[in-house]
Image (cartoon, rainbow, N blue to C red):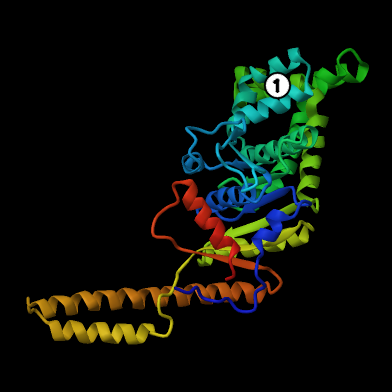
Amino acid sequence: MTRPTFAKAPHLDVDSILADPSIHIVVCTGAGGVGKTTTAAALGLRAAEMGRNVCVLTIDPAKRLAQAMGLSSLDNTPRMVPGICAPDGSGSLFAMMLDMKRTFDEVVESHADPVRAQQILTNPFYQALSSSFAGTQEYMAMEKLGQLRVRAQAEGTWDLIVVDTPPSRNALDFLDAPARLGSFLDGRFIRILTVPARGAGKGIGRLAAMGFGFFTNVLNKILGAQVLADLGTFVAAIDTTFGGFRERADETYALLKDPGTSFVVVAAPERDALREAAYFVERLRTDDMPLSGLVLNRVQDVIDPEFTSEQAASGAQLLTELAGDADTKNAQEARLTAALLTLHAQRMNLAARQRHLADRFTAAHPGVAVSSVPALAEDVHDLDGLRTIGSLLARAR
């Protein structure tokens, strides 16, 4: 079997990235449903078996990663995958699945005293915010990445963290999430609500409180007294943590831009997926973030590239006409051969379409290195399957 060769794209040398001791974070990103989780797990496994101490952070709601790694479950704590190491005994593999709510709680607990933290954690408005606010999952994925990196530096636990980014509709969401959440918590509406608490007892505070009283009367009619009370309690309690959120957002963004981070964009050879990949490549370049290259996943292999789709389709049609409605052994074999030729023609046409789309991408982004992975007969469901993906990622296109 051969895979189509994509025009003039440099090869993405996955092994050189995984073996580079200066690379401490690999971020796998791209559109939803293109195989980011499998790619992240395969890279993590391959790096561990090369001697790195690896932690894979996944945000995959289908929880396939736990099954593939032979773990009963994954949670917000890294779990060691048993039996994974290099031939010389070095290396290890840990895996975890983001718990968005628990991670948000950890941020609050780290930036507030126990009493104020408890006020925030039990507040109904906070509970809704931490569970469903747009961008919270993306922000918490990056927050957890920061936590893991700090732990790795302090304890020497891992020297490589592989991140599977959230399956959001827009692959760029996680880059914007820290600033978006920070802007919300630092926004004008929230600041207005915190004025009485910050200025209580002062002349300006009393004046602000008078204006705030009129403001709350209006909001009472719109939101309801209980909702407004919960909101007011929340902003009063969280006021002292604003700086912490902003600081962590800035630290997370700086971590993503660090030379020790490597971005790998994952895409399927489909129009929409490659369009999102192109947007992401441009965004990474605009933000000066370290892009390593593109993994083109689920590429159609071609069994015999010299036997064209036109020849296969023509042969299939001829055999079908010769077999007719006869029920002889020769006729049955002819129909079976015709079906195989039709399948070959379909695969050749699919490979041609994929090659055309990939060539358009590489022509528009000639400096982006590419590695392709063929479409497999079945989904990856165990460590051997992940090893196969890792080997395919590393080999020449």
Q: Observer-nearest residue: 105 or 39?
A: 39
Q: Position of residue 70 (x, y in %)?
A: 48, 39
Taking 199 as reference, is 118 left or right? left
Q: Is residue 237 above or below residue 96?
A: above
Q: What amino acid does circle 1 point to?
A: Phe
Is disc 1 surrounded by few (<14), some (14 to 19) or many (20+) residues within 10 Å? many
Residue 108 image-quadrant placement = top right
- Residue ID for mark 1: 234
Q: Residue at x 79, y 58 (%)?
A: 288
Q: Residue at x 50, y 32 (%)?
A: 73
- The answer to whether 32 is drawn above or below residue 11 in the figure is above
Q: Is residue 34 above or below residue 311?
A: above
* Rendering coords of residue 144 (x, y %): 68, 36
Q: Quadrant of residue 189?
A: top right
Q: Residue 107 placed where, x, y %?
A: 72, 28
Q: Quadrant of the N terminus?
A: bottom left
Give the residue displayed 60% in from the left and 31% down from the top.
Answer: 76
- Residue 41 spot, x, y in % from top left: 56, 48
Q: How many marks?
A: 1
Q: Is residue 76 left or right of residue 114?
A: left
Secondary structure at badge 1 equals helix
Residue 239 shown left or right of residue 349 in the figure: right
Residue 280 appears in the rendering:
no
Please identify the residue farthest to the front as the structure is shown: 88
Can residue 137 be seen here? The reply is yes
Quadrant in the picture for residue 332: bottom left
Residue located farthest toward the left when viewing the structure as drawn: 327
Residue found farthest to the right: 203
Position of the C terminus, as image quadrant, is bottom right
* 44 or 123, nearer to the observer: 44
Residue visible at 39% across and 73% down in the picture: 347
